Image (cartoon, grey):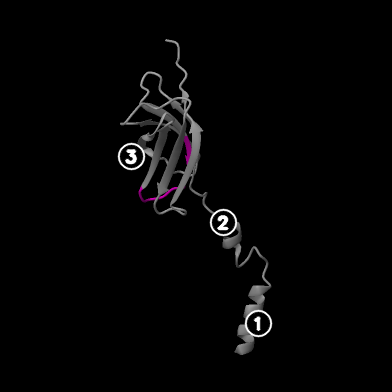
Amino acid sequence: MVLTVLTSSLAALSAPIGAAGAADVTDPSPAATTVTLGDATVDPKQPGKVRVDVGYLCTVAAEARSLTVSVEQKDPQDSSAIGFGSSRTAETDVTCDGTRQQRQFVVQSKTFNWIPGAEAVLTATVTNIGAAPSAAADAKRVTLTIEPTTAS
């Protein structure tokens, strides 16, 4: 009996890779949750609003998901003045299907108008509870520019 168990174990070790452990080797792992920040532009008609481009990718999950974008900017003339705004999407507005998504978010400051030509810190977080990993974030420092106006 010991010889049979030992022989069976050795046979499993010498089996071709495509046999016993095939599921571990060939199954593609789901894409990781990622988020990438793009440009940020101040709305010339409403300078309290800034538009932030965000790209994200998340896998299909049956649980809650969200996407939050925030902007923080210090006034270069007054270091005690800080503008802050945040925008969060509803769960139904976050598409998690394994394909790359591109969105533009409007972030409004309730405290002051955004200052074009000054640096701001952008942060974006996408959560996809039940997926692995369950969240991803990106942050970067950018100089806010004025959104080009379209001729009407």
Vertical relation: 6 (above or below) 143: below
Give the residue at mark 3. 90
Say the numbered circle drawn on residue 130: none
Earlier sequence position, callout 2 versus callout 1: 1
The amino acid pointed to by label 1 is: Thr
- Tell me the element at label 2: loop
Give the residue at mark 1. 7
Q: Nearer the viewer, mark 3 or mark 1?
A: 3
**Image side of residue 20 versus residue 113, left or right:** right
Number of numbered labels in the structure image = 3
The amino acid pointed to by label 3 is: Ala
Earlier sequence position, callout 2 versus callout 3: 2
Q: Nearer the viewer, residue 148 or 116?
A: 116
Give the residue at mark 2. 27
Segment colored magenta = 54-64
Mark 3 crowd level (few <14, some 14–19, many ≥20, 10 Å Cα): few
Q: Nearer the viewer, mark 2 or mark 1?
A: 2
Instruction: Using the rendered image of the protein, determine whether residue 117 is visible from the camera's viewpoint.
Output: yes
Q: Residue at x 46, y 45 (%)?
A: 137
Report which quarter residue 147 is drawn in: top left
Q: Nearer the viewer, residue 41 or 23?
A: 41
How far, Cα to Cα, is label 3 from label 1? Answer: 58 Å
How far, Cα to Cα, is label 2 from label 1? Answer: 29 Å
- Tell me the element at label 1: helix
Quadrant (top left/top right/bottom left/bottom right) for the N terminus: bottom right
Mark 1 crowd level (few <14, some 14–19, many ≥20, 10 Å Cα): few
Earlier sequence position, callout 3 versus callout 1: 1
Mark 2 crowd level (few <14, some 14–19, many ≥20, 10 Å Cα): few
- Do the CB atoms of the residues marked 3 and 1 lie less than 8 Å apart? no
Report which quarter residue 120 is drawn in: top left
Q: Residue 65: x percent and y percent?
A: 38, 46
The amino acid pointed to by label 2 is: Asp
